[in-house]
Image: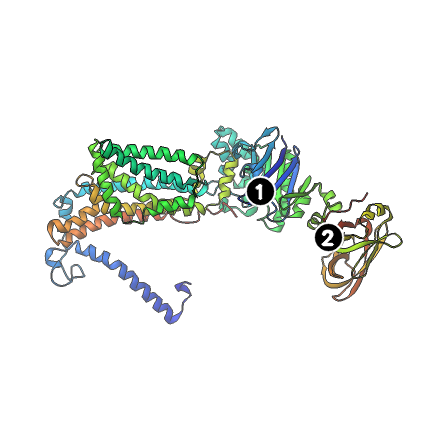
Amino acid sequence: MSIRNLNGRSRAWALIGCLFWFLFTLFPIYWVIITSFKTSLSVVGQARFIPFVDFEPSLLAWQELFGGVRGEFMNTFIASTIVSLSSAVLATAIGAMAAYALVRFPFRVKLAAGLVFFVVALGGYLLGANVFGWSRATAMFAAFGLALLLSLLVNRVRVPGPILGNDDIIFWFVSQRMFPPIVAAFALFLMYSEIGRLGFKMIDTYVGLTLAYIAFSLPIVIWLMRDFFAALPVEVEEAAMVDNVPSWRIFTGIVVPMSTPGLVATFMITLAFVWNEFLFALFLTNARWQTLPILVAGQNSQRGDEWWSISAAALIAIVPMMVMAAILSRLMRSGLLLGAIK
Amino acid sequence: MSGVSLERVTKSFGDVTVIPPLDLEIASREFVVLVGPSGCGKTTTLRMIAGLELPTTGTVRIGERDVTNLRPGLRNCSMVFQNYALYPHMTVAENIGYGMRVRGTPKSEIDAAVKDAARILNLDPYLDRRPKQLSGGQRQRVAIGRAIVRNPDVFLFDEPLSNLDAKLRIEMRTEIKSLHRRLQTTVVYVTHDQVEAMTMADRVVVMNGGRIEQAADPITLYERPRNLFVAAFIGAPSMNFIEGEIVRDGGLRFRAAGGVDILLPVNRSAAYEVALGEPVVAGIRPEHTVRGAGGTAEVTLQVRDIEPLGPHTLLIGALGEATFTAQVAASVRAAPDDRVTVPVDVEKMHIFRKATGDVIPVP
């Protein structure tokens, strides 16, 4: 069913509907653009819609923004760019590998091993911190290391209980996005400050913020990429296997090129998520690695309702994503698989 | 050059046993076709030779090597898939040379091998094209080219022609056959098409339910099927089966409903005597409804349909309860509901035991 198949009145109605929706979604952007050229005079009072007719545009907001009056704008912009690009790239790369492994190789994880991990990690931490009197971070690292080692061991020996498969692992990944992020953000802040006491500064650092973003983006990347990989014809990989192509070459040389549209789309989604992310940035940064959403939100509280400058900052936050989407949309086209199989 | 041998190989997926213990010896340079209905285990068998499936128990050997647990890449097999499985982002030349490139073969050598394969398969004009710019037949030739440059011990074909149209399929059939003659490599070829099996194979392995029903050269399969399954599977149109019994009435006769009363050849009496009074099934191929040298019987069928094919005409009718197809000369004029009497070449007739489905062997 397409608008093209409609005739007469229904066609007109459909067009009107589409046009309405188009204007409805576009209007906020238009509003932000003109507001960024307004002065305090043109914002107060009645609404003014058309530049040069309703109000006299001014470059004041933009001058202030780039002039540094409004805080370290350039610095924030650069921090945002570096953090979101690197975490999106890394999350997509790691997540794609994990998703491929989960699609093509059967894993068997014993529930008992998972329980051992949980018990040893929690118990070991409590024991280390409260009984042995270690610092919290030391106790945590020791407990997690031991828990990992023990659970790997338990997974090798014969133990009763159910065995979890790939779908369970995927669900476990995705389940991490089901609880409210504030739960993780707060815990992460505490963990980072404890690690900081050991001498590894994590709060307000590139590594700290990027790691948090990678960890929080991975579930969505794995979940999305799993569907893309599952849709690939397995025979193409089998042909390469018979041809003695090593697994990693099959992945990089055949699977990745075949799933480029999926990878690009996933990268874009991850990038947008990290670029717009507010909560983690609020908790884990304070000056040097502050990101744009924090800065934009801060405008209001720092100087009052100066909508023109908030609008200018918001535009700066929107535009890079639009440019990225425009560039990458060419790569997202489908049809790359044509010719692989009948 | 090396043969393939499967010894007591079984395969189960969970609780489902796909292949009960199976033994198969494939000689070096032999062209063996595994044929059978869907789900008969032929593709699983092929994939176990390739290493894409590991047998649950048993041993797989290629040449003298035990490859049972070797990964596919180390078995030196080449495989051609039903859906071509080309690398869509590479040109034809890159597709053919990819395996060599990964293995670090010098570029000049790859180019020479690709050129050679392209010449054999008439792919020269297409070397710089992508798979999506090729037709189905050309794509399958690229897949075969990729298999050739491997210079394998064994070629494995998994229904390679099933996705091609009928005309192309016949062309490719001949091409693969002549390729085998030229390369002199062992070939294991899976198909569900018995015509493909008969026309291409040195030896046809008819499989059913994971078991080998009969493994023999095409003519033996056609002339001396070992049981009802093979008899029904090989030959088109399919063999006619009439249930009845053998009685002694001045020589051994086969009698069945619909007035079937056929005097069996004297030289086979000794063989057929063992089944006296036992329920049996007589099998007669449609093309054997002609006068034979060793005595002729006649059956009368109630015609239901007529299929004029040009060289000859098929009469499809009923013989008692059974459906019976007779091949008659193109000049025979018949209409539905006619009763037509056709001769039967009793020398070409087979008698199967109804209980086991096995043929009663004749001298």
Q: Judge left or right: residue B164 versus residue A191.
A: right
Q: Nearer the viewer, residue B82 or A30?
A: B82
Count residues near mark 1 (Cα–Cα under 10 Å), then give few for <14, some for 14-19, many for 20+: many
* Kind of residue at badge 1: Thr
Q: Is residue A177 left or right of residue A68?
A: right
User: Residue A288, position in %: x, y?
Assistant: 18, 38
Q: In what quadrant of the picture does the N terminus of chain A appear?
A: bottom left
Residue B239's tag is 2
Q: Is residue A327 visible?
A: no
Q: Which mark is residue B98?
A: none
Residue A143 at what x, y percent from top left?
A: 30, 34
Which residue is denoted by mark 1 in the rendering?
B44
Q: Residue furthest right?
A: B250
Amino acid type, callout 2? Met
Pick whichever of labels 1 and 2 is earlier in the sequence: 1
Chain letter of the residue beneath label 2 in the structure image: B
Near-viewer residue (B261 or B290): B261
Left or right side of A166 for A307? left
Instruction: Give how far apart the Cα atoms at labels 1 and 2 are.
Output: 28 Å
